Image: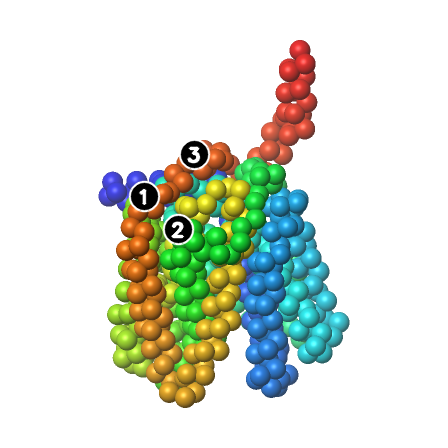
Amino acid sequence: MEIFYASLKSLKAAVSPLSAFLTGTAFVCCGYASLNSTFALRLSQDQTPLYVSGFILALYYLGSVLASMTASRFINKVGNIRAFSAFTSLLSALVLTHIFSAEHSYWAVLRLSEGYCIGTISMCLESWLNTRANNKNRGVIMSLYMVTTYLGSSLGQLFLNIPDHTGYLIFILISIIFSVALIPVSLTALPAPNIQIYKSMPYKKAYQISPVGFVGCIASGLLVGTFYLLGTIYASNLGLSIKDVSLFMFFGVIGGLLAQFPVGKISDMTDRRYVLIAICAALCIFAPLSYFLAPRGGLSLIISAMLVGSCIFTLYPISVSHINDLVTDEQRVHASGLLILSQNIGLISGPIIVSVAMSSLGNWFFIASFFVISVLFIVFAVRHIRKKPDIKYISITPTTPLPTAPTHAFHELATHDGILDKAQKFFAEKND
């Protein structure tokens, strides 16, 4: 029990300072998850050809890729909070413009633009979060971030059940959610990173910092993209009912959510590269097991989906934590963009490669792809660990560490002395 209470206390200490940050993240994830599902549903209802729907939906990832390569300029110029506010506001406006037309080319442009906004917002959040963390708690904090994103995304799916006879209400609600996301982040008392110290980093140099970490991000994209875009098709081809198909997808995500904190905690206590290998080794066991258990439905399906999801959705946060252990604050924003780019490479290519293989070899290759990707990553990781068994970690981040006492989104505004008042007092005392 003492270990449990100690872990609970540690979790509370990590969550409290980030309450405003995580709240804003949850709203953003809720909004874009609902928007993605609404997009796909509308295209399906309009009987849009599958290849056209696939192209339009894929433009979201292309927009995110473009953001990962260029958005660091905006963040470096104005800072994380201002960049977050600007692109979240733009995203809120873009959502409302869907009501003007349902033309495919028009929606394709909107999809690309929205992907760019989400990619920039993700860079703002992840680079900021990793600057506030240190090597002793980065795994736990990243796991909290991922849990928040999964919870927000899950809640976003519920918006599809809201009656919308006009077809406009859902876009209005999503726009409101993005607007509300601005409030906690814009008013947070948690200091933003120093925007004057950022440095660019070529992809080759970033890769050389940790090949295992960057390839881990690509592998994560391959696995997550395959699960999200092809999981429904795979489960349907197994002959499962619509209810069981939805359970397979839902509990896959839930498995990833529940695994975030324990896996993150373990990664804080050891070399994260070994944790990445362990995750993929576990997937090599759970994936074939799922192939035999999932068709049975019921509890067998739920357990198998959760086991697979617990591996698929923990690979990215551990990879990100590992990279951020090895970079300085000056490099963090650009590194964050390169990490997002790496995962997007997998998100785009994974479903395409696996879908072609499934068409040629059969439905079983969906599960086999998890096994193949995991084995290839393990071989790659072991090879590089042998070359570089020891890593020089940046053990102390140059920024102020996370406060131990709780802070709140409106803390600075609630005090008698505002930020400007404190500045005036400081200079007055200095002149005296």
Q: What residue type is disc 3 on?
A: Thr
Q: Look at the numbered disc 3 and give the secondary structure of its residue.
A: loop
Task: Evaluate whether residue 415 shows in this view.
Answer: yes
Q: How is the image coloured?
A: rainbow
Q: Can you tell which quarter of the image residue 393 is in? A: top left
Q: Is residue 85 left or right of residue 395?
A: right
Q: Which mark is residue 322?
A: 2
Badge 3: residue crowd in 10 Å (few <14, some 14–19, many ≥20):
few
Q: From this viewpoint, which residue is outermost toward the top?
A: 432
| Residue at 31% across, 81% down | 295
Identify which amino acid the numbered label 2 is placed on. Answer: His
- How far, Cα to Cα, is label 3 from label 1? 15 Å
18 up-or-down from 310: above or below = above
Residue type at numbered disc 1 = Ser
Q: Residues within 10 Å of mark 2 (few under 14, many from 20)?
A: many
Where does the N terminus fall, quadrant-wise?
Answer: top left
Q: Position of residue 321 (x, y in %)?
A: 41, 50
Comes first in the chain, label 2 or label 3: 2
Question: Which numbered mark, 2 or 3, is in the foreground of this view?
Answer: 2
Residue holding disc 3: 404
Instruction: Report the side of 265 relative to 152 (left or right).
Output: left
Tell which of 145 and 417 is nearer to you.
Answer: 145
Return the residue at label 1: 7
